[in-house]
Amino acid sequence: MIAVVAELNIFPIKSAGAVPVTESELTAQGLRHDRAFMLVRPSGRHLSQREVRRLALLRPAYDGVKLTVHAPAAAVPLVHEEVDGPAWDVTVHRRPCQGIDQGDEAASWFTAVLGVPCRLVRFTGTRPTRLGDGTLTFADGYPVSVLSAESLDDLNRRVDVALPMSRFRPNIVLRGLGAYGEDGVVGLRGGGAEIELVRPCGRCVIINVDQETAERGPAPLRALGRYRTGRFRDEQGIMFGRLGVPRVPGFLRVGDRLTAERGPDADTG
C-alpha cells in the first residue's frame, strides 16, 4: 500500500506550538530538532498543556543553534542561543531523563509569558522508548507520531465543528491509507528511511485544547470515545494514530510516496 506524506511537523519545545516543514531529516530520535527543549517546574517535572494551556500559543523556531520563540503575551520574542552546562535530572511523566539548563534570561521570559515558575532545558543523554528498543528526546514515549488525514476526515463527520489536524500534533500526516488505515500499518519506508510503527497513540485531554486560542472544549475526546472502543482504548487513552521508532535514518519530504507495510492481522475500526 502507498501513502503520501501530506504534512511534516516538528515541535522544538515539548508541548509548545508546531513548526510545519516541507522536509526533515529522520534520525534515530525522530525528526531533527523535535522535542529538543522542554519547560520544567523548579522541581524538574515537565510542563505540559494539561496544566498550562498557554503553551499552545508559543511559536518556536530552532535551527540547531538559535531558538526563537514568539508569544502573544510577549512584547518581544525570545532569541536564545543554546548553552552548555551541567546536566539536570528532570522527568517526563515521572520517567527520569536529563536536560541542560538554558539560563536565567530564558527562564524569566517563559515564566513571565506563562505565569508559572519554569525553566528551559535542552535534551542531553540517552532515553529509551517504552517499547521497540528505540531512543528519543523529550517526546512522551516514542520518537514519531503518525496520523492519517482520512482518519481526521472521518472524525470531522462526527462532530459539529470540523477540527484542524493541529489538535492532534502529529509529526507525520499521511494520505492514502483510508480512514484508520494506519491502525493496521506496522512499517513505513521511503526517502531512504524506515519507521516501525510499534503501538497505537493513546489520546489525552490535550487534544481538547485549541492550538490557536488555548481554549479547551470536550469535542474531539468525547467524540472519539463514542466509537473508538474495545481494542482502541486502554489505560493510556483512546487510540487515534500510531507511534513509531525509526529503524533507518533518511530524509522525508511532503509529497513523498511511502510504502506502508500492513501487519498480518490488520483491520480498521
Image (cartoon, rainbow, N blue to C red):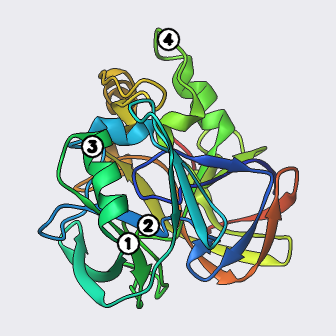
170 or 133: which is nearer to us?
A: 170
Residue 246 found in image quarter: bottom right
- Tell me the CA gap for discs 3 and 4: 33 Å
**Badge 4 density bin: few <14, some 14–19, many ≥20, Cα 10 Å:** few
Q: Residue at x 87, y 57 (%)?
A: 256
Determine whether 128 is above or below 264 in the image. Answer: below
**Badge 3 density bin: few <14, some 14–19, many ≥20, Cα 10 Å:** few
For discs 2 and 4, the disc positioned in front in the rendered view: 2
Horizontal relation, residue 232 to residue 22: left or right: left
- Tell me the CA gap for discs 2 and 4: 33 Å
Image disc number at residue 102 = 1
Determine whether 268 is above or below 132 in the image. Answer: above
- Tell me the CA gap for discs 3 and 1: 16 Å
Which circle's residue, 3 or 1, is located before the other in the chain? Answer: 1
For discs 1 and 4, the disc positioned in front in the rendered view: 1
Instruction: Name the amino acid type tagged 1.
Output: Gln
Which circle's residue, 1 or 4, is located before the other in the chain? Answer: 1
